[in-house]
Structure formats: structure tokens, C-alpha cells
Amino acid sequence: MNVTLRSAALVLLAGISYGATAPIIKLAHGAGFTWQQITAGQSTYGVLLFLLALAVVRLRGQRWQRLAPRQLLKLLGTGVVTCCTCALYSIALGYLPVAVALTLLFQFTWVGVLIQVIATQRAPSKAEVASAAIVLVGTLAASGLLSTELTIDYHPIGMACGMGSAVSCALFMFFTSRVETDLPTIQRGLVICCGSAILAYTLCPTYLIDGVVLAQAPFGAPQGLFALLLPVILFGLGGPHLPTGIVSILASAELPTSIVLSLVMLSEPIDAIQAAGVITILVGVVVSQAPTLAELGGQRKQGGPPQPR
């Protein structure tokens, strides 16, 4: 029981950590950095932080596990996908308020269902269909489309990139739960970050030589910490001890965290309808995992521990 509670707390912190990135990216835009520089900064500082973490675990005796070329390519490819999410999300945040860009990103909940259906050739469950419908309704409200008090410029590029970030995020979650999961957490995270950096430097080839690295440290370092280092470590420590459905529910703490921090740090307004939309999206995430929650409850009554999936 203590292991389960501790693992749940770690995954919850990972979701909260992700939630801190949106206002940081928005502040970076306000400071004059482009989306290419923001993307490259996140990858760069993510790699640096993982190198520091690797040095710590090496001092504690953990050895580097040799990777076959196929393993290396898989992990680097996963990093490319997460870089796509960062790039598209950064573009969206350049055009849209955090609440709108974030609710578009959160469409990964139902996009992930589609990917799962295509990959497994399995029809979606009733809970998954209901969840997709609830999330779509919540998005309509949370995006501000139903609000009369707010005036939001729904730039088509921002909207398209927001939805693109949802697709790439869903793909990243699909791959990251299947690609070389038996590797040590820090080593795996470092290679994934290197894959992200490869694409980031392709998008911003002069990043390391035009003096932006140090100037962007106040934004890039927190991005690398909250978007890469902490989530990878926390998910790696807590995720294996929890059912996948519970991990999804706890990780959805990203949504309210970003909304609240944007309200505090950026003074971005949110009205009652948008707040209700955010809550509706979270309800949709829970509904999608109703069978898992029911199964977990049955295991509790029988006295058995929850089985990770």
C-alpha cells in the first residue's frame, strides 16, 4: 500500500511538472525568443541535465548499458517525436492563450485511443468512446468558444499546431511505453533527449553558435527540468508500480497546473465556462479509465495489490 501511494505521488508530481512548461514557454515568447530557439533550448538543457544525472548515477555504481544500433535508433526516434510536440506546442503558444493551446494539446486523450485502435486492430471500448465525447465537449468550453466575456483570436496556424501537438504527444506516449523500457531510466532519458536535440538543431542550426544558449538559460533550463528530466525520472520510478489507466489520470494534473500558473504568472483570464470545460476534460480522462478503476477497486476488496500494466 505504501509503495502504491508513493508511486501515485511521484506520477502526480510528474504531471504537475509538465504543467509548469506552458507559462515558461509563453514567457520565453514574450522575451523575444522564437519557437525554434525555445525548442532547441528545451532539448539542450534537457541533455545537460540528464548528463549531470548520469554522472550522479555513475558515481553510485550504475554502469552504461551497451545499446545495439536498432535500440539506439528506436530511442532517438522517440526523441524526435517529443521534439515535434515541443515545437508544435511552442508555435501554438505563440498565437494562442495558454488555456486554448493546452486544451488542444489535451486532445491526445482521444487521439491516443485512435492510435491504439489502429495499432491493435481492436474496437474502442464504450468507456473510451464516452471519454472522447466528454473531452471534445470540455474542449469546446475550455477553449473559450462558448464564452461571451473573453475575446480570443483563434489564429488558424495556432489552432493547427495545437492539434498537431496533440497527435505527436499521443504518438510519443504510445512509443515511450513500448520502446526499450527495460533500460536504466537515466540512460534511456538521455538518449531520447539526444534524439530530440537532433531535430531541434535541424530546426535551429545556429542555436549553439549565435550566443542564444546563455541568454535563454532562464527559460531553457526550467523547460529542460520540468518537461524532460523530472517527468522521465518520476514516471520511471512511479509508473511501473501502477496500472496505466491510473497513470493517465494522475498525469492529467498537467492541465489544471498550467491553467493556474498561467493565471498567476501571466494574468491570463479564465471565466467560469472555461473552468467548467477544464473540469469536464479531467472527467473525460477519468471516464476513459473507468474499467481500470473498477478492477483496481475489486483488487482492493480482495486484499490483493494492484498489478502494473
Image (cartoon, grey):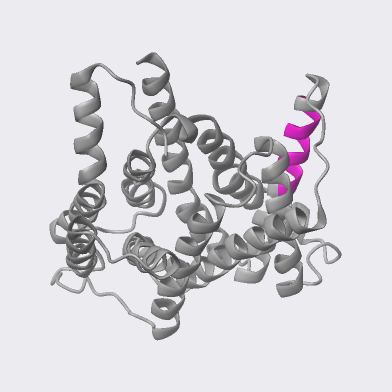
The answer to whether 163 appears left or right of 172 in the picture is left
Q: Quadrant of the N terminus?
A: top left
Q: Residue 274 in the image: state x and y as whole percent.
A: 20, 60
Q: Quadrant of the C terminus?
A: top left
The extreme bottom residue here reads 156
Q: Position of residue 20 (x, y in %)?
A: 46, 46
Residue ID at (31%, 47%): 256
> Is residue 61 located in the magenta-colored stretch of the structure?
no
Residue 266: image x %, image y %? 40, 54
- Main SS, magenta region, reads helix
In this view, the residue farthest toward the front is 121
Asked if 119 appears above or below 22 in the picture, the reply is below
- Left or right: residue 124 compared with residue 197: left
Residue 51 magenta-drawn?
yes
**Residue 75 rendering spot, x and y as whole percentages:** 69, 55
Residue drawn at (24%, 52%) of the image: 288
Which residue is located at x 25 percent, y 31 percent?
Answer: 296
- Count of picture labels: 0
In which quadrant of the rendered view does residue 253 lie? Answer: top left
Tell whether 38 sits left or right of 170.
right
Using the image, determine if residue 250 lies above or below residue 209: above
Query: As displayed, is residue 223 above or below residue 233?
Result: below
User: Which span is picked out in magenta?
Assistant: 47-56
- Residue projecting furthest to the right: 209
In the depicted view, which residue is nearer to us: 211 or 305? 305
